Image (tube, rainbow, N blue to C red):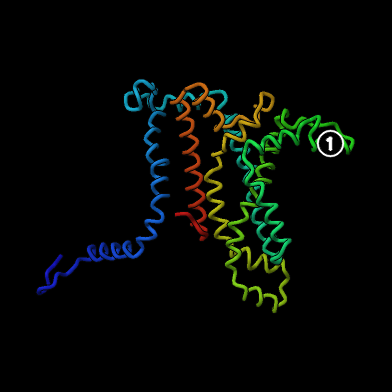
Amino acid sequence: MELTGNKPQLTAQQKKREKRKKSILASRQLYVFILPAFLAFFIFSYIPMYGVMIAFKDYIPTLGVWGSPWVGFKHFQRFFDSYYFWDLLKNTIGISVYSLVVGFPLPIILALALNEIKDGPLKKFSQTVTYAPNFISTVVMVGMILAFLNPSTGIINHVVQFFGMEPIAFMENPRWFKTVYVLSGVWQGTGWGSVIYLAALAGVDTQLHEAAVVDGATRLQRIWHINLPTIRPTMVILLIMNVGSVMNLGYEKILLMQNPLNMESSNVIATFVYQQGLLEAQYSYAAAVGLFNSAINAILMISVNKIASKLGESSLF
């Protein structure tokens, strides 16, 4: 701070600090509003990250995290040298990419279709029917899948037999596992996934559509040249987030659908971490495998985000 006459002259850094302070005070209600979410995220997501160090130790519960001996990359090397490494990687990437290719465009298509329906009973019914599966729990969902696909009593196999074909043991055949997993997930999540796109479409200026109609544009042309460009930033952000979680398959549904006959296709990194960490108590080994999985996710997200920003599209950071 410099003195000019009797009045102190603030430096550029002090002015910036004062401006930031005034901005925070002016928005203090918003900061109080997000404080509980911030604290929950910090306490349950960031503080436990110190436990990642057990991936580089031979963790012994009686010695604790800090007292256990360091072993460096021993557990990572063990995982990379194992005979099941490539099978786990292939299954994880295969299911994730399959889910992304099939599941990412469908919420966009559904949102565009629902947006074209006029407000009324039909639109409300369509939204209710497509949103409802999202609220079915994983356990109930898997129970429905097993019931529908049962070789002797399942409704799907009744349809198959009606057309003169032999019943198919979907859950016992490794070739069918990925398809059943992905399509059931698409059925459950497509309606709910369309909500964010419908919100983005709500911001489309109606004057653009009016002008396009005057110019003779068809409905498909208006969707292609007005609606899609409007939701493109949302599409890019969600694509980045989806690619960033390619390796992050939830183990609950896969574990419930898994059996010894389909293990060839259903054994993924997430279920392997569960088995090693909780069932066999190999905490350090499971932590190393989980850390490897998270690192791949982070690399993929940063890479796709970088590509999107260079192409002039929206990006996360």
Name of the residue lying farthest toward the bottom? 214
What residue is shown at x 53% (from left), y 50% (from top)? 240
Mark 1 highlights which residue? 158
Q: Nearer the viewer, residue 161 or 54?
A: 161
Question: Which quarter of the figure is the C terminus placed in?
Answer: bottom left
Mark 1: which secondary structure? helix
Q: Is residue 242 depicted above or below 22 in this figure?
A: above
Q: Is residue 265 left or right of residue 163?
A: left
Q: Is residue 68 left or right of residue 159?
A: left
Few, some or many residues within 10 Å of mark 1 (<14, 14–19, 20+): some
Q: Is residue 79 left or right of residue 159?
A: left
Question: Which quarter of the figure is the N terminus placed in?
Answer: bottom left
Q: Is residue 107 depicted above or below 81 in this figure?
A: below
Residue 276: image location, x then y, percent: 51, 25
State the image quarter where residue 117 is shown. bottom right
Q: Nearer the viewer, residue 14 or 306?
A: 14
Residue 201: image location, x then y, percent: 61, 64
Q: Is residue 112 depicted above or below 172 in this figure?
A: below
Name of the residue lying farthest toward the front? 121
Name of the residue lying farthest toward the right? 164
Residue 294: image location, x then y, percent: 48, 38
Q: Is residue 198 left or right of residue 276?
A: right
The total of numbered circles placed on residues is 1
Residue 162: image location, x then y, percent: 88, 38
Q: Amino acid at mark 1?
A: His
What residue is shown at x 77% (from left), y 30% (from top)? 169
